[in-house]
Amino acid sequence: MNKFDYFNGFVYEILNWYSNDVNRDWNDLSKLKVLKLLFLSVAEDDKLLSIFDNFVAWDLWPVELDIYEKINLNNELLAFEIDNKMTRRKQEVNIPKDAIKEWEKMVLILKNKNSNLVKKSASALVDITHEWRCWRIANILWKLKLSKELILNSNKFYWNEYF
C-alpha cells in the first residue's frame, strides 16, 4: 500500500466523520482543512510519519508536500477532488481495506483528542497547528522540512472540547 492509498482511506474516514457529526448536504473540507487534519492525525504515530514523510512548514500549515502536489494536479491516484472549498468523491476507487482500518483507528484517536476538530474552520486549525513547536521551529528556519523526530517530540496541541 502506498502513501496515496493511505490518504484516500483518511479522506474517506474524514468524510464519514463530517457527515455523521455535521450532517449537511455539503462539506467545508477544503484543501487547507483536509491537510491540517492529516497532520494532526499522523503527528503522534511513528509508522504513519514514515509513510507521510514529506511535511514542510509553510506559513499557514505543516503540509505533506507529496499529497499537496497530487491534490493540485487532481491526480488519478486520488479518489477525491479536494479544492479550496470542499471535498467530493471523484469516482468509485478501490481503497484497500487495510488503509480504511488504519484510518478508522487514527480518526478515532483524533476524535478522542478533540471531537470538534472536523467542525472547526480551516483558520481555527491553522491556529491549532501554529501552537505546535515543530512548526514554529521549522518556520523560523525558513520552511525547513519537518523531520519525524521533530514532529514526534513536539508539544501536542488540539484545543479542548470547547474550542
Image (cartoon, rainbow, N blue to C red):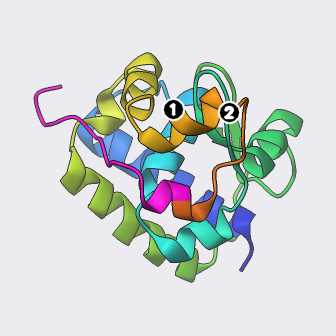
Density class for disc 1 (Cα within 10 Å; few <14, some 14-19, many ≥20) is some
**Going by the image, does 15 lie left or right of 140?**
left
**SS state under label 1:** helix
Q: Residue at x 36, y 58 (%)?
A: 107
Asked if residue 158 is among those painted magenta in the image, a careful observer would answer: yes
Q: Residue at x 41, y 28 (%)?
A: 125
Tally of numbered tags: 2
Q: Position of residue 115 (x, y in %)?
A: 21, 44
**Going by the image, does 65 lie left or right of 98?**
right
Q: Position of residue 78 (x, y in %)?
A: 76, 53
Callout 2, which amino acid?
Leu
- Which SS type dominates the magenta stretch? loop
Against 138, residue 46 (above or below) is below
State the residue position of label 2: 141
Against 156, residue 159 (above or below) is above
**Going by the image, does 149 lie left or right of 6?**
left
State the residue position of label 1: 136
Closer-to-camera residue (128/114): 128
